[in-house]
Amino acid sequence: MNKRDIIRLAFKNFMRRKTRSILTILGVLIGTSAIVVMLSLGIGMNESFRRQLSSMGSLNVIDVNPWYFIEDGRGGGYSGQNVLDDKAVAKIAAIEGVEAVTPFLQTGLRLVSGKYVMYANIMGVDPNALEAFGYKTAKGRMLTEDDTTALLFGSNTPYDFYNPRARNNYGGGYVYFGGYMGDGVERPEPDVDVLNDKLVLTFDFSYGERRPGGTGGSEGGNKKPKLYKVKGVGILEESQDERAYSIFMNIEYLKKIMKENERAQGSMGPRPGGSQQEGYSQVKVKVTDMNNVQKVQDQIKEMGYGAYSLTDVLKSMQETSATMQAVLGGIGAISLFVAAIGITNTMVMSIYERTREIGVMKVLGCMLGDIRNLFLIEAAIIGFFGGLLGLGFSYGASALLNRFAGGLFGGGYYYGPSQDSIVSLIPAWLALLALGFATLVGIISGFMPARRAMKLSALEAIKTE
Amino acid sequence: MENIIELKNLRKVYRIGEEKVIALDDVSLSIKKGEFCCLLGTSGSGKSTMLNLMAGLEKPTKGTIRIKGQAIEKMSEKKLAKFRQEHLGFVFQSYNLLPMLTALENVSMPLTFKGLSKSVRDKKARDMLKAVGLETHIKHKPSQMSGGQQQRVGIARAFVAMPEIVFADEPTGNLDSRTTKEVMGLITEMARENNQTLVIVTHDLEIAGYADRIVHILDGNIEKIDIINARRVSNEEADNIISGADAVPAGV
């Protein structure tokens, strides 16, 4: 028999006992939906973890710091500090799978614009690497290699200016600090237009303050720290990490002015945030593929530095959800197993009913393999349609869960329930896998009955009683 | 003409519990190509067992069965299926049509097993249904047809693949006498037309009357053989009749 005829005949047989076929399919439907919905909960949980984490920062970025810790395998260990300098940066950049590396030179400076001042958390970075790390501007432009006095503002920093001589002199800055999320309240424009107003950077932290017995900025006597004219070129998009609270500039220029200041201040000792002799306090590493993060991270640790990434968090979260998925999937698997028994039962029944027909087919010269395939395909049809309908049902259930159960699970490990919280997610691979699996279950369930049909004695079958 | 079927010292013993039942004792028989041979006997005589052995549905306890020179008793299930597909046709007492298939699909079934394309087998099956006078019932299911009609579909099915041998086990057992005549006429005519060998098992003398030779079977042995049409049969006695005196007319 050719394949099309076998399938056609199997379909005809399948349609003969509609009620029984439908009930069997219903069993598979329930089994498939149970597995798919259960797994979709786990996948949804993972996905919402991932979204939460990526809103906290990029998942394929590793933070490297000079501190190392080596476990001794007995719960203890020893720690120390290695210098994280340009040589180390180059070495890290050479690791396979690393896309971009930038050191972060952090220092605190005073930023002044007219009567407004702020404490600026300045980050010296490699301008070429910014884009790779996902920095995007909301206004203005990014830093470029040729920039020197250019500043790139974190989304929150323009609000940090305040007028030290005003009565409630913190009014401009800290009111919104951390409290701006989600309320839907428009923030007022900051007092300083950082992209257009004139800006000055200084190491003098008392610059512009009200001082006893003198007017601001005109204190005599000591050698005053130099003023650097700077220019705002861009403001970053809003984010929920440290970026929002930092101001970025070219690391080379920052090194230069820090050196100048050190020379000028000579006796005052090293500045907080570290000079370059001590190396960088932090280096960020971007890895091309998220799956390589762990590998690269391990290599950096071997070099004697501390390395940390959001993958660490994700990993422990995924372990939790994998356990949950296994338990839930197991429950689903039991119902599919019951459905499989249902298919076997149905097939055994129909073979009993059709003993005579099978015998006739054998006597008329139907090949044994064809008889077996006929029943295997009938069982596969039950599995396939059960799976297909179960999948449809699962998508429906998944949509309902996402709509009505959003607040119950997931969504909100770190922040309150967000609108895009996912409870249940059925990716295409799960759908295809479920369909294939249901069909396979059908075939496996049909295997024993099909063999039995094949081995039926043709003589017994056609005996006239 | 050569013998298409040769049975030699065929013995079949069934074991039922402790008891042995001898269905066939020691049977030898040759059937010529194009012969219409009737195995006549009462129920339990062993005539059906003989047919089953010839069709390879059962294995003999002893003896050999050769069809077209091939040892049937030594064939595997798989080879037998192929052999039946290519050389044998069957007509059953209870028609044995598949209930979910139409007349056309039932008739074309042996062709389906052979793997012929739908257009080819539909054409052949249609012609066959026409030949048995059922061109109006092509789309009917077995449940929508009378016994006679069903058996005509059965006959069409047996002959559609042009097998060299057609076996029929009490083909008219479930039919009334008028339909029996129609059906027997149809079978005989079809087999004659293509010089096909026909082996019919029956207990009905009237049916036996259509045959070229009647083999009487009693208690697992051939009791006697009646030669009706000596020219068509394979038998020493028949040879004698033909060579001895051409003047002797058919019928004993």
Image: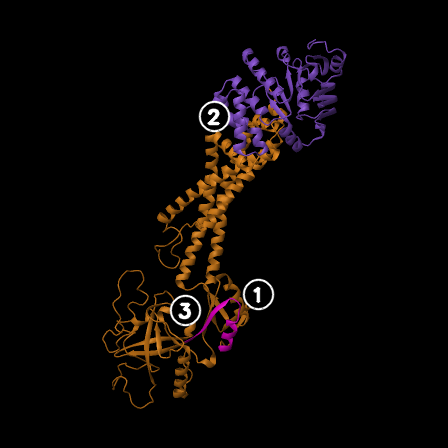
Q: What is the display colour for chain B?
A: purple
Q: Which residue is mark 3?
A: A131
Q: Let me know if residue A156 appears in the view.
A: yes
Look at the picture and state if A316 lies above or below B32: below
Q: Is residue A87 magenta?
A: yes
Q: Which chain contains the residue that carries disc 3?
A: A
On the same chain, marks 2 and 1? The answer is: no
SS for dot 2: loop
Residue depicted at x 43% and y 55%: A47
Magenta span covers which residues?
A86-105
Q: Are discs 3 and 2 less than 8 Å apart at CB?
A: no
On the same chain, marks 1 and 3? The answer is: yes
Q: Which residue is mark 2?
A: B139
Q: Residues within 10 Å of mark 1 (few under 14, many from 20)?
A: few
SS for dot 1: loop
Query: In the rendered view, does A397 fall on the left or right side of B231?
Result: left
Residue depicted at x 44% and y 55%: A46
